[in-house]
Image (cartoon, rainbow, N blue to C red):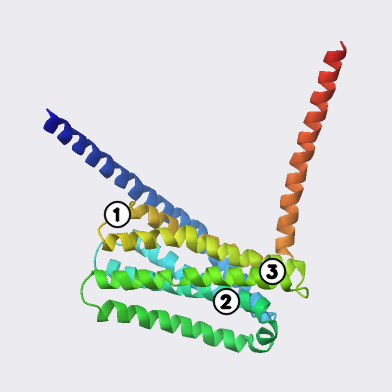
């Protein structure tokens, strides 16, 4: 009887696991097409807008432009993967998609580093942070990620070694992003020459990049590391869904690249909050008046 109960429970658990995987797989496909349809045109528009800023003499958008280009590659790979039949092309697209992810992480670090240098080393950044240096660094990031990926894939023996090495590479930005944010906050507390708007823009960029990595990249990295030890914590489709939302978050960086945009956003939020507080105060006043009249009667 106990064996029958155990078998029934096991079959029920397996059925629930299969059903959950099917639901997550369907959710992944739906999310993929939603992200592509929204992110692809918006990314093209954002790149065009940031290129106009670079032509105007600003250096900061260079790394964000490269980040959006890597997102564009990811969108194209996702679209081809969903539309094309299974075969050799899927393996090639998977390789290109992974390179796009590596490049995306590289430029997330570059964006955070550039914002950190603006505060921590303002004199050095003023004389060294020019367009030529940014372009050279961008080319180096692209070349490094491509060469490293090829070396990991074709120079490794066994299926687990590339997975472990790529997971380690994907973990490297985490301490760097935390260091840049902590160092920037520490430098900002002692800085009096940086305008308030510029401080909000810099901190906003660093917080957004760190949250993007922590909430959207890190879960899938943890899954990959757990898969190497055969201790799966959650379904990988959930990590893929979160990862595909990352390019949409990168689009928010465009807000922090335009002067005055952050103040307008904060002013709008404060105005909405004040409106709600005024409405709540008016409701409380009416209730108090009503209660006073009832008590007087």
Q: Earlier in the sequence, mark 1 or mark 3?
A: 1
Q: Quadrant of the C terminus?
A: top right
The relative height of residue 267 versus residue 65 in the rendered view (above or below) is above
Number of dots carrying numbers: 3
User: In this figure, which residue is indicated by the disc labeled 1?
Assistant: 232
Split into 4 quadrants, where in the image is the N terminus? top left
* Quarter occupied by residue 208: bottom right
Q: Quadrant of residue 195?
A: bottom right
Cα gap from disc 3 to disc 2, whole angstroms: 19 Å
Which dot marks residue 258? 3
Quarter holding residue 163: bottom left
Instruction: Decide which of 69, 146 is in the foreground and name it.
Output: 146
Labels 2 & 1 near each other (Cβ < 8 A): no
In the figure, is residue 106 to the left or right of 116? left
Q: Residue at x 24, y 39 (%)?
A: 13
Query: Is the Cβ of the residue at disc 3 closer than 8 Å to that at disc 2?
Result: no
Looking at the picture, how far across and down is residue 64, in whole percent? 57, 73
Q: Position of residue 33 (x, y in %)?
A: 43, 55
Q: Nearer the viewer, mark 3 or mark 2?
A: 2
Tell me: 151 left or right of 189.
left
Question: Is 75 located above or below residue 34 in the figure?
Answer: below
Mark 2 — residue? 113
Specify which label sits upstream in the sequence, 2 or 1: 2
Give neighbour class at mark 2: few <14, some 14-19, many 20+ (Cα, 10 Å). some
How far, Cα to Cα, is label 1 from label 3?
43 Å
State the residue at coordinates (77%, 42%): 275
| Residue 259 seen by the camera | no
Mark with earlier residue (3, 2): 2
């Amino acid at each position: 009887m106990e064996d029958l109960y155990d078998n029934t429970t096991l079959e029920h658990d397996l059925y629930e696991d299969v059903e959950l995987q099917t639901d997550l797989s369907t959710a992944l496909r739906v999310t993929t097409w939603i992200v592509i349809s929204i992110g692809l045109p918006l990314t093209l528009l954002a790149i065009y807008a940031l290129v106009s800023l670079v032509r105007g003499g600003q250096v900061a958008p260079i790394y964000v432009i490269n980040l959006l280009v890597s997102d564009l590659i990811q969108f194209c790979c996702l679209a081809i993967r969903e539309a094309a039949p299974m075969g050799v092309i899927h393996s090639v697209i998977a390789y290109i998609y992974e390179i796009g992810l590596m490049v995306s992480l590289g430029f997330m670090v570059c964006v955070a580093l550039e914002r950190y240098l603006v505060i921590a080393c303002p004199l050095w950044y003023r004389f060294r942070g020019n367009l030529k240096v940014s372009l050279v660094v961008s080319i180096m990031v692209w070349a490094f990620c491509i060469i490293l990926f090829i070396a990991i894939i074709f120079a490794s023996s066994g299926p687990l070694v590339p997975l472990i090495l790529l997971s380690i590479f994907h973990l490297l930005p985490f301490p760097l992003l935390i260091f840049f944010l902590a160092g920037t906050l520490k430098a900002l507390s002692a800085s009096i020459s940086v305008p308030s708007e510029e401080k909000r823009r810099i901190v906003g960029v660093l917080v957004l990049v760190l949250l993007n990595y922590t909430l959207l990249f890190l879960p899938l990295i943890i899954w990959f590391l757990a898969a190497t030890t055969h201790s799966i914590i959650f379904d990988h489709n959930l990590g893929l869904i979160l990862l595909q939302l990352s390019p949409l978050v990168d689009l928010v960086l465009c807000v922090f690249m335009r002067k005055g945009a952050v103040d307008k956003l904060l002013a709008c939020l404060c105005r909405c909050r004040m409106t709600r507080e005024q409405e709540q105060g008016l409701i409380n006043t009416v209730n108090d008046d009503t209660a006073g009249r009832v008590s007087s009667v």
